[in-house]
Amino acid sequence: MARSATDVLDSAVRELAPAPGANPLVPAIAAGEAPREVFAALALEQHHIIASDRRSFRHLAGRAAAEPPLAAFFTYLADGEGTALEHVRTLATACGLTEKEVAAHEPRPGCQAYPAYAAWLALGAEPADAVLALAANFAAWGDYCRAVGQAMRHRYGFTDEACAFFDFFATPDQELTARTLTALQHGLDSTALDLPLAHRYGRHLQAYELMFWTTLTSPHRP
């Protein structure tokens, strides 16, 4: 019996979900126990991550140009990264960072492993496999962003405007869900989707996602 895109995505989200307690930072933020400076660090690192991911998604859209359902998924992601970049600039300002400080920031390798791997996927992975790997990771990322956004308001006193970056990723996006399922169904119907390989990519993305948060708990040495 053929598997549906919904079943494939749900299975990947369950199987690739990070273990409880694997993220050392988000629970501390949720409890109001992390230093306020962590939000400036998040803004500085995400400034680099978003710019890199946007290029990666555009490249994947170009590689998938002959397969419109896949290209549409990556184009939507790339457009969303443009919006996220504006939100992260607002967050940086709310944290007291100047444009000069943002531009001069030396990114941490542990924080930048995720976009580096996303760029590797953009160059070498089959686009259909990258869709599933990314979509599974977005579920965990969205949960983390939801917790951070709520804590910023209720534990740290940030404004709604300052929290917009995390709200953007935490808010369910019906258009993204529709494009994800359409892209995955195309991959299944065309047999372009290699589930074991896509899950491998997804496990790596989840590991690099956790590396991002863990790195932020360590002192930064430029």
Image: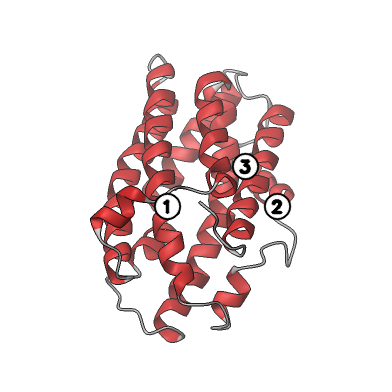
Res. 129 in view = yes
- Up-down: is 165 above or below 10? below
Query: Residue sitting at 70 percent across and 52 percent down?
Result: 14
Tell me the CA gap for discs 1 and 3: 16 Å
The N terminus lies in quadrant: top right
Task: Tell me the SS state at disc 3.
Answer: helix
Q: Amino acid at mark 2?
A: Arg
CA neighbours of label 3 inside 10 A, class few (<14), some (14 to 19), many (20+)? many
In terms of depth relative to the viewer, which is nearer, 1 or 6?
A: 6
**Residue that carries the numbered disc 1 in the rendered image:** 46
SS type, badge 2: helix
- On the image, numbered disc 3 is attached to which residue? 205
Q: In the image, is 201 to the left or to the right of 171? A: right
Residue sitting at x 37%, y 50%: 47
Mark 2, other Cα within 10 Å: few <14 / some 14–19 / many ≥20: few
Residue annotated with mark 2: 14
**Which one is nearer the viewer's eye here, 14 or 95?**
95
Q: Are marks 1 and 3 in contact (CB under 8 Å)?
A: no
Query: Disc 3 marks which amino acid?
Result: Leu
User: In this rendering, would 64 be left or right of 164?
Assistant: right
Residue at x 58% of width, y 63% of height: 219
The disc labelled 1 sits on which kind of residue?
Gln
Q: Which numbered mark, 1 or 2, is in the foreground of this view?
A: 1
Which of the marked residues, 1 or 3, is nearer the chain's N terminus? 1
